[in-house]
Image (cartoon, rainbow, N blue to C red):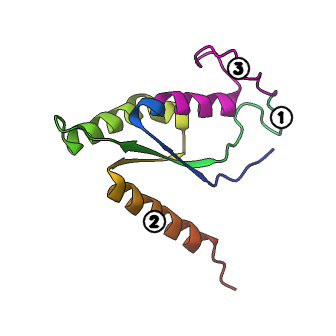
Amino acid sequence: RHVTPWATLVVGWREAKPCAMAIAAARNGDVSNLRPDARRPVLQPLEGESASQVSVAVRQMIISLGVKPEHTKAEYSTRAAEWFDNEGYRLLGEIDFQVTTGVDDLHKVLEESLTCRRASSIVSL
């Protein structure tokens, strides 16, 4: 079944990798990389035209970094960008990826995302 991605997932640094792994598992059906969890139900078999990769609702993933005083925003942003380049892209594919450092930055990115979505949904005849 085709799903048009629409959701924005906002996570902290510690949740980024597990969430990316869960998105990858939902897309390809391979749960072998997920940590064991007795409460997680078995995934339904993939269905549709191409069972090799299915669509998910997540359109954008934002890592919202809580910056500690002993580290700079640049250090955290660099770490997150390196993670995405080395591992995140493999897991997330074409999902839009952003890093924010603080509430004001997160608000700005979310506002820009909503503005872009509204503009792209306007059809001119």
Up the image or down, 30 lies above or below 5; here it is above
Highlighted range, magenta? 17-44
Determine whether the residue tagged by mark 3 lies in a helix, strand or loop: loop
Q: Which residue is mark 1?
A: 47
Horizontal arrangement in the rendering, residue 6 relative to residue 101 (left or right): right
Please identify the quarter of the rendering in which residue 106 is found. Answer: bottom left
From mark 3 to mark 2, how far is it between C-alphas? 35 Å
- Which residue type does callout 2 highlight? Glu
Q: Position of residue 86 (x, y in %)?
A: 39, 29
Q: Who is closer to the viewer here, 61 or 41?
A: 41
Q: Quadrant of the image for the C terminus?
A: bottom right
Mark in front: 1 vs 3: 3
Determine whether the residue tagged by mark 1 lies in a helix, strand or loop: loop
Residue depicted at x 58% and y 71%? 118
From mark 2 to mark 1, how far is it between C-alphas? 35 Å
Q: Position of residue 35 (x, y in %)?
A: 58, 16
Q: Earlier in the sequence, mark 3 or mark 2?
A: 3
From mark 1 to mark 3, how far is it between C-alphas? 24 Å
Q: Which residue is mark 2?
A: 111
Q: Quadrant of the image for the N terminus?
A: top right
Horizontal arrangement in the rendering, residue 99 relative to residue 19 (left or right): left
Residue depicted at x 65% and y 51%? 5
- Which residue type does callout 3 highlight? Arg
Q: Position of residue 18 (x, y in %)?
A: 52, 27
Determine whether the residue tagged by mark 2 lies in a helix, strand or loop: helix
Which numbered dot is residue 39? 3
- Which residue type does callout 1 highlight? Glu
Q: Who is closer to the viewer here, 29 or 49?
A: 29
Horizontal arrangement in the rendering, residue 43 relative to residue 16 (left or right): right
Q: Who is closer to the viewer here, 66 or 85?
A: 66
